[in-house]
Amino acid sequence: MARPILISASILSADFARMGDEIRAVDQAGVDWIHIDVMDGHFVPNITLGPQMVRAIRPHTTKTLDIHLMIAPVDRYLEAFAEAGADLMTVHAEAGPHLHRSIQAVKGLGKKAGVALNPATPAEAVDYIIDDVDVIMVMSVNPGFGGQKFIDSQLRKIEALRKRIDATGRDIGLEVDGAIGTENIAKAIAAGANVLVAGTATFKGGPDHYAANVAALREAR
């Protein structure tokens, strides 16, 4: 059975001075999720957004708010993001010693839980928590900045994770985050991904181009 392909628009590439308008525009352009990158300047070498931005965005869309928590420690902030309106919270396998505890904390808040893997982290890292997560995210760039080059070795990891997911029989999203565009989205989908994070590829050209950008991503598959 064919898996639905979802586009998660990364607001890291949006115009921060017009965020409400930007969210409404990409929502109307046909994206499936809104991807919010949270960076702490510690786990990754950049600082971005917090629960306040999630709270500000929430009234502008009913789409899934896909919160990517590139922070360490992470557990102490989960409740704030949940209360702000997160639907899915993804934590990094590398962000702390108690991944299972973090996943359970997300689920305990009534939210969907994801686990993200940095480029050097093997697929095997999910083996003992795969039955507890709703999404597995493969980082196809090193986390921390937009505008990087897609790391082709991650296609093998996507393939390995797809086999693991299919073996569970569960509906677990396989998300890819980093440098996704029309030139490589087909490769990621062929490897087994079904959730594609697109920042620059979604927001380039301004609001008048968003619908065409999203359509181009879907057609390139």
Image: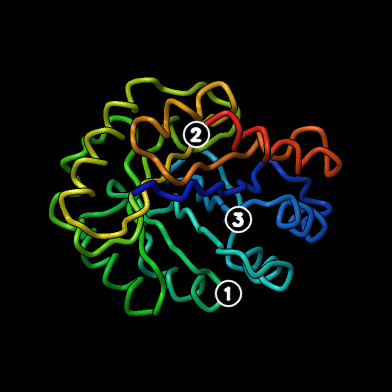
Q: Secondary structure at mark 2?
A: loop
**Outermost residue, right direction?**
208
- The residue at the point 61 percent across, 33 percent down is 219
**What residue is drawn where x is 51% and y is 30%?**
185
Q: Residue at x 73, y 39 (%)?
A: 203
Badge 3 marks a residue whose secondary structure is strand
Q: Position of residue 161 (x, y in %)?
A: 24, 41
Where residue 109 sits: x, y (%)? 39, 79
Residue, disc 2: 178
Q: Which mark is residue 84?
A: 1
Cα–Cα gap, marks 2 and 1? 25 Å
Name the residue beneath numbered marker 3: 34
Instruction: Between residue 129 and residue 166, name the one nearer to us.
Output: 166
Q: Indicate the secondary structure of the residue bearing disc 1.
A: helix
In the picture provided, is 187 more to the left or to the right than 37? left
Which amino acid type is shown beneath numbered disc 3? Answer: Ile
Mark 3 Cα shell of 10 Å, populated few (<14), some (14-19), many (≥20): many
* Residue type highlighted by circle 2: Gly
Q: State the image coordinates of residue 142 (x, y, percent, origin top left).
A: 43, 31
Between discs 3 and 1, the one toward the N terminus: 3
